[in-house]
Image (tube, rainbow, N blue to C red):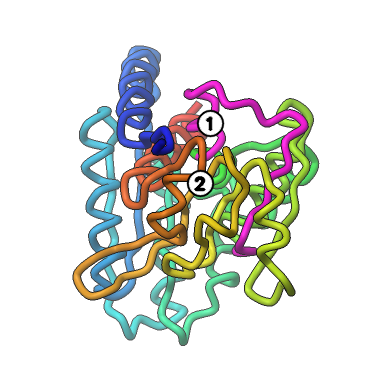
Amino acid sequence: MSAHVLDGKLVATEIKQQIKEDVKRLNEKGIFPGLGTILVGNDPGSVSYVRGKHKDCSDVGIASLQIELQEDASFQDISAAVNELNNASECSGFIVQLPLPNHIDALAITRLIDPMKDADGLHPENLGLLLYQQPRVVPCTPMGIVKLLEHYKIPLEGQHVVVVGRGLTVGRPLGLLLSQKGYDATVTLCHSKTPNLWTFTSNADVVVAAAGMARGIRAQDIKSGAICIDVGITRIGNSLVGDFAEDVNEKASWVSPMPGGTGPMTRAMLLANVVQLAQ
């Protein structure tokens, strides 16, 4: 029997409709949310992703501002762009698209973002508020995962969640979020250096894979009935593949597809954060 699908496209569409209604109500009060993006270079994935974010803005009535810089842009060039959006009244929240070129210190750039305009929720101040369970905004992919599970009424309380991947955008903040009161999951954070990784995944109720290990987690690596959330993405030839192998579908109870699962949810949560910051 094949696993049920956690359809991120479907859920994101519903969330965007609610955001559209929220934006209308804010507009009536004289509040006009606006998303800014800073794109450095022309990485195809980043270009496509940013283009999609601005299309989402158009769909829900959020204004958008785009700043594009060359691949060889200096730290000072990017800093100036950040400062421009920090001071732009029509921009209620913005992102610096990651990854940045290797010659740029991404953390140093992130620290320059006004925390009240940090649409990605990755500024140290906002991550600190998440740690204290008083989030201003939550990083988009972790919140998207939670909303996806909530939509399908999949409980987290008391569940053992194994997160594979310790990145700043997914793994670490997701662990903080799921272990908070209200979600009450027990979280184990694993990564590429974890010995005997499969002993953890095979005992998990929920496995979130965000390590970029193309089809590296197989059916034999999970327990029967597990919930599998695929966040990893790797390009193989002309295809994008996730971290779960196809045979996982025959053993898991629920699976989020890649693409089409967490990606649309991440984009929807970015819009939600922009509206939250505008309020």
Residue at 40% x, 59% y is 242
User: What label does residue 229 carry, if any?
Assistant: 2
Residue 270, position in %: x, y?
43, 41
Residue at 45% x, 44% y is 93
Q: Amino acid at mark 2?
A: Ile
Residue at 46% x, 87% y is 103
Residue 45, position in %: x, y?
28, 65
What is the quadrant of residue 154 in the picture? top right
User: What label does residue 59 carry, if any?
Assistant: none
Q: Could you tell me how many numbered marks the image carries?
A: 2
Residue 213, position in %: x, y?
48, 70
Residue 149, compared with residue 42, is above or below; it is: above
Residue designated by label 1: 149
Q: Is residue 140 visible?
A: no
Q: Quadrant of the N terminus?
A: top left
Return the residue found at the far front.
1
Residue 224, position in %: x, y?
59, 43
Q: Is residue 166 magenta?
A: yes
What is the quadrant of residue 27 in the picture? top left
**Tags 2 and 1 touching, CB below 8 Å:** yes
The residue lying toward the viewer, choosing from 206 and 96, is 206
Residue at 31% x, 29% y is 10
Rate crowding at label 1 as few (under 14), some (14 to 19) or many (20 or more) other CA atoms within 10 Å.
Answer: some
The residue lying toward the viewer, choosing from 247 and 68, is 247
- Helix, strand or loop status at disc 2: strand
Magenta range is 145-167
Residue 28, compared with residue 270, is above or below; it is: above
Q: Is residue 177 visible?
A: yes
Left or right side of 254 for 238:
left
Residue 157, compared with residue 259, is above or below; it is: above
- Helix, strand or loop status at disc 1: helix
Q: Amino acid at mark 1?
A: Leu
